Image (cartoon, grey):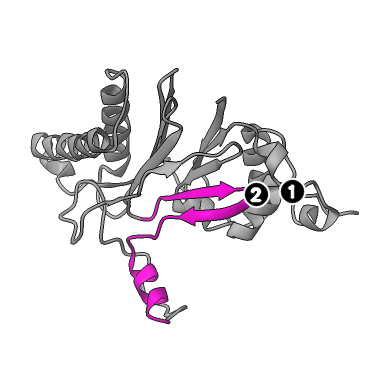
Amino acid sequence: MNITFCSTSQIGGRVSNQDATGTQLNEQFGTFVVCDGVAGSPGGERAAVIARDTLLSQTAGHNALSPLQTEEMIAACEQAIRAAQRAEPALKKMSTTLAALFIDRPGRRAWWCHAGDTRVYHFRRGVVHDMTRDHSLVQQLHDAGYDNTGINSHLLYNALGTDSVQPHDYSAVLPLEDGDVFLLCSDGFWNNLTPAEMEQALRMVNSPQEWLALMQKAIDRSEKKDNLSAVAVWYGSPQDTTLLFSLTDSARFLPPRD
């Protein structure tokens, strides 16, 4: 089955970009990753790059991937960040979120891992079929029925390079269908779009490049305060399995009339 993908990473309203994205695709498997260096301590950008590069360098040496192997690879990313922390005391608290998607092409299956508030969305037939749950205080408050508390609700309790209070999350193995779509994105990206808006944009395009570009137009109309990064992955022909273009869907993404 054909796999197409596109990625973007932008500075947004920050003075530097602490996000890192990476992709790797061959005849046997695909690896896709987005990391977002955690702000508040020096070295977030470095931690994101270490995690991304460590993961891709490991998958490059394999002819096939299994869920157990990828769990070991994520552990190696953690170890690489720890080693860098020890080598450079000024960066001893650096950490990064991570979202990683793995596709076994011969087996027609996928799975993913995430830590922090960088997300993985899975779309099937044009709608969100599954998405990760953030390892953040805001998610805990939302689960408890509290919203808009006014406190630092984006505090993370899981990231690579920290003493996380719970293990990173690994999905179950997903049998793939023609038309499945995945979106990996940092909080600077998904904070500016609702899942419904992502679905609307998906129904209007014919490629992952067009999809990211259309969502970017909507994001550009919002107040961008953070780095924003995303990787879009299409399995097969999503344009043939999602709903057709509609004028109501296009309202937010078309420029206003004079």
Which residue was labeled with disc 2? 126
Q: Is residue 34 visible?
A: no
Q: Residue furthest left?
A: 86
The structure residue drawn at horizontal position 11% and vertical position 41%, both measured from the top left corner, is: 89
Query: In the rendered structure, which amino acid carries the disc numbered 2?
Result: Gly
Identify which residue is drawn at 69% across, 42% down: 241
Q: Earlier in the sequence, mark 2 or mark 1?
A: 2
Quarter occupied by the C terminus:
bottom right
- Give the image location of residue 116, x and y in percent: 33, 54
Quarter that holds the N terminus: top right
In the rendered view, tell whether residue 139 sits above or below residue 216.
below
> Residue 56 is drawn in which quadrant?
top left
Q: Secondary structure at mark 1?
A: loop
The image shows residue 224 at horizontal and vertical percentages of 56, 53
- Where is residue 24 drawn, in percent x and y? 42, 24
Query: Dot 1, crowdedness within 10 Å: few (<14), some or many (≥20)?
Result: some
Left or right relative to 164: residue 122:
right
Q: Residue at x 26, y 42 (%)?
A: 43
In-front residue for pair 248/187? 248
Say what amino acid the circle numbered 1 marks.
Leu
Residue at 18% x, 49% y is 93
Q: Which residue is mark 1?
A: 243
Q: Which residues are magenta?
A: 117-145
